[in-house]
Image (tube, grey):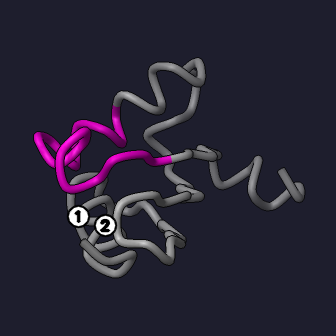
Amino acid sequence: MTPAIIQSLIEQGLPGARADVRGDDGVHFEATVVSDAFRGKLPLARHRLVYATLGERMGGEIHALALRTLTPEEAGAGG
């Protein structure tokens, strides 16, 4: 698994989202995801949306994914 593949999966699963994914060891990653879909949602609900784009890969190919989830407004405010 690579950061680029994870970025692609997230961005395909959350239309209009932008994802910045990093990770050097192939199993532990961190991602910042900016999406309108997060508006009005608590952090846990935001994370579930992202995890849903990755499906069974979570806990399998992707051992750990640290998430930072922001709306475009939060990202623009330096969120």
Name the amino acid type tagged 2: Ile
Q: Are marks 1 and 2 in contact (CB under 8 Å)?
A: yes
Disc 1 target residue: 9
Total number of numbered discs in the rendering: 2
Query: Is 52 drawn above or below residue 61 in the view shown?
Result: above
Q: Position of residue 52 (x, y in %)?
A: 23, 37
Query: Is 76 drawn above or below residue 38 in the view shown?
Result: below
Nearer to me, 75 or 61: 61
Q: Is residue 63 magenta?
A: yes
**What range is drawn magenta here?**
49-65
**Dot 1 lies on which element?**
helix
Nearer to me, 73 or 11: 11
* Residue displayed at 36% across by 28% down: 48
Asked whether, in this view, residue 47 is left or right of residue 12, the answer is: right
* Residue displayed at 59% across by 18% down: 42
Distance, label 1 to label 2, CA atoms, is 5 Å
| Residue 6 disc label | 2
The residue at the far right in this view is: 78
Nearer to me, 52 or 18: 52
Query: Is 51 drawn above or below residue 79 in the view shown?
Result: above
The residue at the far front in this view is: 25
Q: Characterize the local packing of mark 1: few (<14), some (14-19) or many (20 or more) Cα atoms within 10 angstroms.
A: some
Asked whether, in this view, residue 62 is left or right of residue 18, the answer is: left
**Dot 2 lies on which element?**
helix
